[in-house]
Amino acid sequence: MKTAAYAAQSAESELSPLSIERRQVGESDVHIDIEYCGVCHSDIHTAHNDWGGTVYPVVPGHEIIGRVKSAGNKVSRFKEGDLVGVGCMVDSCQSCSACHDDLEQYCENGATMTYGSEDPILGGPTHGGYSDQIVVDEKFVLSVSEKLDTKAVAPLLCAGITTYSPLRQWNVSKGDKVGVVGLGGLGHMGVKLAKAMGAEVVMITTSPEKGADAKRLGASEVLVSKDKDAMKQHTGSFDFILNTVPVSHDLNPYVSLLKRDATMVLVGALNPLPDVHGAGLILGRKRIAGSLIGGIAETQEMLDFCAEHDIVSDVEMINMQDINSAYKRVMDSDVKYRFVIDMKSLKP
């Protein structure tokens, strides 16, 4: 079925209107009218081919909120009018050990990502949420609470689950001292979620001017990483550190903040990192780990947790036609904290 969308035609081009083809609704499919789509930094990296391998044209967008328009005859969990979400994945092999463990994001045969993967039905690349409709297998559709501010739920499908999953997997709980490094799209969600889990949250930043906002979001303290005396006072005191910095940076100062047997998890930096001093890890039996998004079951758990605790992202709304200026502002760190596209602006 013909679908209105916005796409990048090359690494150098701006995003512009494009008509794409969606598959017909199969017996296990859910047809969704998209109402909102978040703008993730990964969208920009993909559109600009920063990571290599982008197949053009590419329609980004993997923070999708909409309502069910129709459903196949074998769909049991959703009906017309339901508020639903689609995150970073739309399929996986469903047969490997990772899929059996509800960890589809680590599918051993490669998960089908919402955009940029090989479309197993239509061929060519999958196309994401910068469009007015999408068809997705029921297994990869998420239920969204009507209690939350719908437009601000969209970034939970990536930024929310990217930060929730490591907090959950490393058992962050009441009384833990948790550091969140970097106050951006990911970091602001990390602060909110860790606070809701009962942790004492410390925002760790290079920018002291971000302190007031960090405390508004739930941080009890702000630690400026450039302040050597302040860093020394916090040495060996953190139970867990969530590092959301998206670029290469020195990890050693943060390792020194960890308690014995504590872990720092990286969720932002996908590129090579400077050398880590082995002694910093060995002498405290400390760990540096990484984490991707969550599986579908954990993502649903995250959405339910956010509904229970009234957590959404801080967002700025834009029209689809504003996407290129929004990309520039994201690259200039000029947004608090996520852009969300009102997809009504794409409809005739």
Image: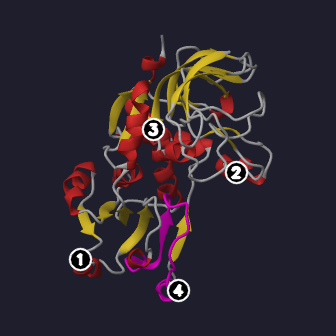
Q: Residue furthest front?
A: 12
Mark 1 Cα shell of 10 Å, populated few (<14), some (14-19), many (≥20): few
User: In terms of secondary structure, where does tag 4 sit?
Assistant: helix
Mark 4 Cα shell of 10 Å, populated few (<14), some (14-19), many (≥20): few
Labels 2 and 4: the sequence-earlier one: 2
Labels 3 and 4: the sequence-earlier one: 3
Q: Which residue is mark 3?
A: 39
Question: Label for residue 230?
Answer: 1
Q: Which residues are magenta?
A: 255-284
Instruction: Estimate the spatial distance between the alpha carbons at disc 3 and disc 4, rounded to whole Å.
Output: 37 Å
With 88 as the anchor, is 111 left or right in this view?
Answer: right
Q: Is residue 64 above or below residue 51?
A: above
Q: Which residue is mark 4?
A: 278
Which is more foreground, mark 2 or mark 3?
Answer: 3
Which is more foreground, mark 3 or mark 4?
Answer: 3
Which percent across, then down, holds residue 131? 54, 24
